[in-house]
Amino acid sequence: MKVIFENVTKKFGNFTAVDNLNVKFKDGEFVALLGPSGCGKTTTLLMIAGIYKPSSGKIMFDDKVMNDVLPKNRNIGMCFQSYALYPHMTVFENIAFPLKLKKMSKDEIKKRVMQAANKVEIGHLLDRKPGQLSGGQQQRVSLARALVKEPQIMLLDEPLSNLDARLRINMRAEIKKLQKDLGINMVLVTHDQTEALTMADRIAIMNNGKLQDFDIPEELYENPKNLFIANFIGNPPMNFIDVELVEEEGKYFVKNEVIKLELPESSRERFDFSSCSKQLVLGIRPEDLTITESKCNTLQAEIYVVEPLGRDKLVNVVIGERKYKIIAPPKFNADTGDKVNISLNFAKIHLFDKTSEGSIRRNRV
Ligand SMILES: Nc1ncnc2c1ncn2[C@@H]1O[C@H](COP(=O)(O)OP(=O)(O)O)[C@@H](O)[C@H]1O
Ligand SMILES: [Mg+2]
């Protein structure tokens, strides 16, 4: 089922929580709504559910306008951060609850509950009460209760936030696998960029009620359209340096009081230098910086502190007054106060207009 937002705005009094949203989810797609707290993710989800009605614009499922369709007529499964299980009911009774409301026969209910429970691998826990389950098991019960109605679309609002780190990583994969197996639409609300990147087919990234971009994870990571996306996606986050673009003898340089770097010829293909502003922000991810012997076209830095991460080392350096992060191999050996040179992978640099905050790279294909 396609889910289509056409010029959808949601206001609470004078406050605009979702601002003119235009986006189309494909049939069977796993979409993440990503952004900082308060950016309008839950409001968007509740409009899909029919719990909120858009102030203006249209929401469509395939070609049917849904604005006036009640939640109970939408064939939707929902699962929230607080699993909202009934503590006095067993797991079986919790999962069966939505079907009882539909006055389904006892045999049919039993069959459906077993099927849903088996899909999330809790078939052996049906007699327990929620209080006798771990967080991850409660999460699965909540998923099973959403699935048991055989919804066309599943809406998940921060479903993993209450789980400990290890379980969260496991459940990420489990929910993704479940979505692939069932082939139903899934919409996941999260403020956690790793969750969005790892789970979703496409990510709608929002800020202040406005959609920033809607694209596949790789594209948002490799080619962020603006500073907000560049800053929000990636862990550890992208490094940013305020620079001025200068042209000297046919070559382009970026510089400030402490650095001057020559941009390679090839960067003209990626960026439009002719019409852009001269005040830019250069962005580079920690994995695209390398500590090197060379003093040629490199940054001179002092090591602030080194954090071993096992697989690699996170090296924090200071250039001028500002701190930057670099991913170095585990064998990297240096310590606080050491002077190092840092080379950039120029094929991976990002340049943003300092005023508009938009990327100055040429149009994406
Ligand atoms: N029922 C409501 N009444 C008034 N303001 C609301 C209501 N629901 C949400 N908001 C406001 O709308 C903004 C977006 O909220 P929400 O969609 O819950 O954000 P998110 O889920 O991204 O954290 C917030 O500033 C929030 O305070
Ligand atoms: Mg929310």
Image: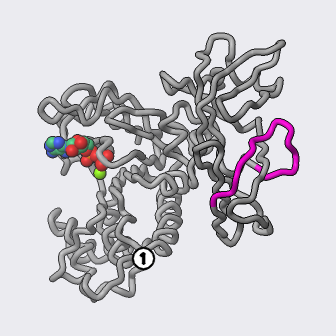
Check the picture and name the quadrant holding the C terminus.
Answer: top right
Disc 1: CA contacts within 10 A as few (<14), some (14-19) or many (>=20): few
Residue bearing mark 1: 118
Q: Is residue 317 above or below residue 321?
A: below
Q: Position of residue 233 (x, y in %)?
A: 53, 46
- Secondary structure at numbered mark 1: helix
56 sits left or right of 251 in the view? left
User: Residue at the spot x=81%, y=18% of the render?
Assistant: 251
Q: Quadrant of residue 312?
A: bottom right
The amino acid sitting under disc 1 is Asn
**Residue 45 appears in the picture as rendered:** no
Count the marks.
Answer: 1
Return the residue nearer the eye: 210 or 130: 210
250 sits left or right of 143 in the view? right
User: Residue at the spot x=68%, y=11% of the render?
Assistant: 274
Q: Which residues are magenta?
A: 290-304
Check the picture and name the quadrant holding the N terminus.
Answer: top left
User: Residue at the spot x=40%, y=52% of the render?
Assistant: 191
Q: Position of residue 261 (x, y in %)?
A: 76, 31
User: Residue at the spot x=59%, y=25% of the render?
Assistant: 280
